[in-house]
Image: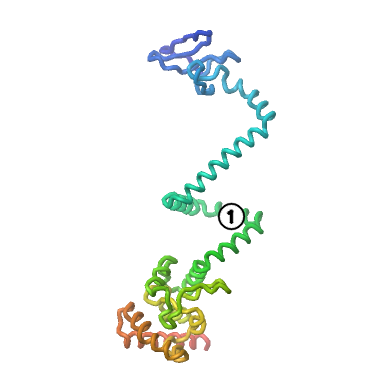
């Protein structure tokens, strides 16, 4: 609601439209040529060639006109805004794809929002999954095919944490660990080539001291990459006993390459590290026996 003040000056345009200015010449209000009321400039739409740079009719008087126009041209308006949306979406996707800083910033903002609105974000996710069951299944299937190693990493992390063991290696740390071994199994010498038949990697991360023993954990001092079939055969056995069931070449590589490397990581000599592993096995078996009895 406009109120006239003492320092306001009423003027008229060349066409007779009233408008109000301050002593400094700044326009603050004008007359609506439809309803005849003097209103603040904010109640008028912008128009470059209009009086005070505003439309002749106020927004309230123009409202019925816009409503009628929207009803008569709904398809045209929808097509226009859809084209604008598609252009903007394509631009944002390209910018997101080619700009690492944008991706990191977006991820940071989303993490912060989810942490601050955990329950609400969880409901949104649940509603989306309930309404898009097939789409969610297809997405999850494709994601697991494209991220087998990452999915396996999460599974290992969960298994380790359930036993209250340290889990310090991230997915990136695991990739660095593989790089240290030149993408080779230190025991068999098998490389990282993917098996095209099963689409599985031939190398798998292994815990020298098994997680089942409740000692060690998913840490740099206890992890290395091994040929997948060997990893499966080792399971939760004592590595020094398990290696005796393998070919002589594998046994030689185990004692000459792998064990010295693991001993060095744990700041021990080979003898000290060997005794330590046997002591861990002894503690595990004693604890297992006490639980069963």
Frontmost residue, 201 versus 63:
201
Of residues 271 and 243, the one nearer the viewer is: 243
User: What colouring method underlies this structural image?
Assistant: rainbow
Provide the secondary structure element on which disc 1 rests.
helix
Is residue 103 left or right of 122 when viewed as pictured?
left
Q: Which residue is depicted at the point 34% across and 84% down? A: 273
Residue at the image position 57 percent from the left and 38 percent from the top: 84
Q: Measuring from the top left, give residue 216's x and y in whole percent.
A: 40, 77
**Left or right of 31, for residue 166:** left
Q: Whole-percent x and y of residue 114?
A: 50, 53
Residue 98 position, x and y percent, is 45, 50
Q: Which residue is mark 1?
A: 125
How many marks do you count on the picture? 1
Q: Position of residue 164 (x, y in %)?
A: 45, 73
Q: Is 155 situated above or below 29?
A: below
Rendered position, 149 above or below 114 = below
Q: Residues within 10 Å of mark 1 (few under 14, many from 20)?
A: few
- Residue 155 or residue 234, whichever sits in front: 234
**Residue depicted at x 65% and y 55%:** 132
Figure quadrant of residue 213: bottom left
- State the residue at coordinates (67%, 26%): 68
Q: Is residue 123 above or below residue 52?
A: below
Nearer-the-camera pick, 185 or 271: 185
């Amino acid at each position: 609601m406009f109120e006239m003040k003492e320092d306001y000056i009423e003027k008229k345009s060349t066409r007779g439209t009233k408008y109000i200015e301050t002593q400094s010449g700044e326009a603050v209000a004008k007359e609506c040529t439809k309803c005849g009321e003097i209103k603040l400039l904010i109640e008028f739409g912008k128009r470059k060639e209009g009086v005070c740079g505003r439309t002749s009719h106020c927004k309230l008087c123009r409202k019925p006109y816009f409503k009628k126009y929207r009803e008569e041209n709904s398809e045209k308006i929808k097509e226009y805004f859809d084209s604008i949306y598609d252009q903007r979406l394509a631009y944002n996707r390209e910018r997101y794809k080619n700009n690492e800083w944008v991706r990191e910033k977006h991820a940071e903002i989303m993490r912060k929002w989810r942490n601050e609105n955990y329950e609400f974000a969880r409901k949104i996710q649940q509603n989306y999954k309930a309404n898009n069951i097939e789409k969610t299944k297809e997405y999850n299937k494709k994601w697991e095919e494209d991220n087998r190693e990452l999915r396996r990493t999460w599974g290992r992390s969960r298994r380790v944490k359930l036993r209250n063991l340290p889990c310090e290696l991230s997915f990136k740390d695991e990739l660095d660990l593989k790089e240290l071994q030149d993408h080779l199994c230190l025991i068999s010498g098998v490389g990282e080539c993917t098996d095209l038949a099963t689409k599985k990697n031939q190398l798998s991360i292994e815990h020298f001291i098994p997680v089942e023993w409740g000692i060690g954990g998913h840490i740099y001092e206890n992890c290395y990459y091994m040929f997948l079939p060997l990893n499966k055969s080792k399971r939760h056995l004592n590595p020094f006993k398990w290696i005796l069931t393998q070919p002589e070449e594998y046994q030689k590589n185990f004692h000459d390459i792998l064990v010295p490397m693991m001993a060095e990581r744990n700041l021990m000599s080979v003898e000290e590290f060997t005794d330590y592993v046997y002591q861990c096995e002894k503690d595990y078996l004693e604890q297992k026996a006490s639980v069963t009895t």
